Amino acid sequence: MNLKYQEQSHIVVSAERHYSGITEIIYGAGESDYMAVVKLTRGRYHRVLNGHPWIYRTEVEEIHGHFNPGDVVEVVDHRGRFVGRGYINPSSQILVRLLTREQGEKIDREFFRRRLVAAIEYRRRVVRHTSACRLVFAEADFLPALIVDRFGDYLSLQTLALGIDLHKETIVELLDELLNPAGIYERNDVAVRQLEGLPLKTGFLKGPFNPVVEIEENGLRFLVDLAGGQKTGYFLDQRENRLALHGLAGGARVLDCFCHTGTFSIYAARFGAREVVGIDVAGDALEMARENAARNGFGQVCTFREGNAFDELRAMDRAGERFDLIILDPPAFTKSKEALEGAIRGYKEINLRAMKLLPSGGFLVTCSCSYHMTEDLFLEVLLDAARDAGRQLRLVEMRRQAKDHPMLLASPETYYLKCFVLQVF
């Protein structure tokens, strides 16, 4: 960061700070009480005007006024017309995350209350037959980088950007007032926080309590580890997709790869599978999967084995094993465009191997939670895998993330989960 001192006609400019080509003009006494103003570069912000809440450094011409990282700033277009307000972090590639486009709306405690109430009310309308759901889905609920999940009487929270992290105490207080949960657990152990200059941390925000809690979902019971489970403890986004097994699993021998704590496996058993084999590399998750199966009365139908799904699929093919229904729900193979080629190879390999284990007419439920793996690209990968496996595919159904993970159409990053139900011939 370079500093240089200068004077302008009637405004004293005490310094300029430069962030990768962006000039922040820091005004002297008398101007410092005003909100800093971010001016967008002409011709480079159509995406923002169309509703996307992120403003990248490359879209900013200059910043007028003083700010501290995480502060709320005002955003204007190249002519000075109001665009919105959001929090700023010059250490992040996403310089500003917009909170509001209403010029008269203040970002204060009541603002966060209104946003939280609206998010909770939306879930009351669209979520059914479960005691667990995502209450706040960040940008899609107009609270960028904030994740709040409900697991029965408990909440799990993530603040994934500096700006929202500075309001964490207020948000926790409001959640306590609005929902009165028995406990709140912080799962800020996500690597993306480091890109914001934030430390990784976990712990009780209201508690302490036993972080292994029970939830109910469509008449089934599952244990969730809020402290040690993947994501915030459970894959809430797949809840509606698990119901897609209804009608496919009856009398079937089922293989559930990347099974985690066994939810897809147990749904398959509930829908009449005669045998379910679950595979995952995480021994702790498999222990919970076995407990979940027993808890729902399917301990004899479901078996779980520890192993790498890629290796297990190859070994099963060599051994001549066959399944009537295979579920592939892997973790994200890429979180960046640069790693996409490797992800394509990974998705092709597991789907090709799975197709070889199915008889003609068998079913494949295959998923991708990588945002960069678009729907069209995923279909191309599946067709490529089918060609190499000597199989043909019939599309039964295309599914997405559950309704408590809504998609903001102007922000394609909020659409990340693809789930295709295919019949293989």
Image: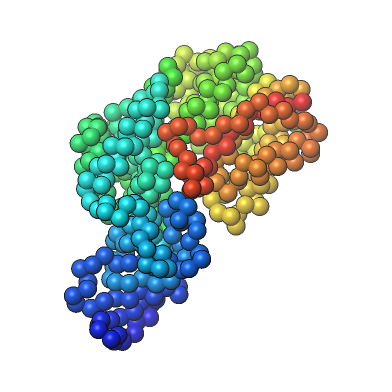
The residue at the point 25 percent across, 81 percent down is: 11
The tally of labels here is 0
Residue 223 pos. (x, y %): 39, 26
Colour setting: rainbow
The residue at the point 56 percent across, 23 percent down is: 244
Image height of 3 relative to 169, above or below: below
Image height of 21 relative to 314, above or below: below
Could you tell me if residue 280 is visible in this image? Answer: no
Residue 133 pos. (x, y %): 39, 31
The residue at the point 54 percent across, 34 percent down is: 400
Residue 128 pos. (x, y %): 40, 23
Q: Quadrant of residue 272?
A: top right
Could you tell me if residue 256 is visible in this image? Answer: yes
- Residue 68 relative to residue 43: left or right: left
Q: Quadrant of residue 211?
A: top left
Q: Nearer the viewer, residue 383 or 309?
A: 383
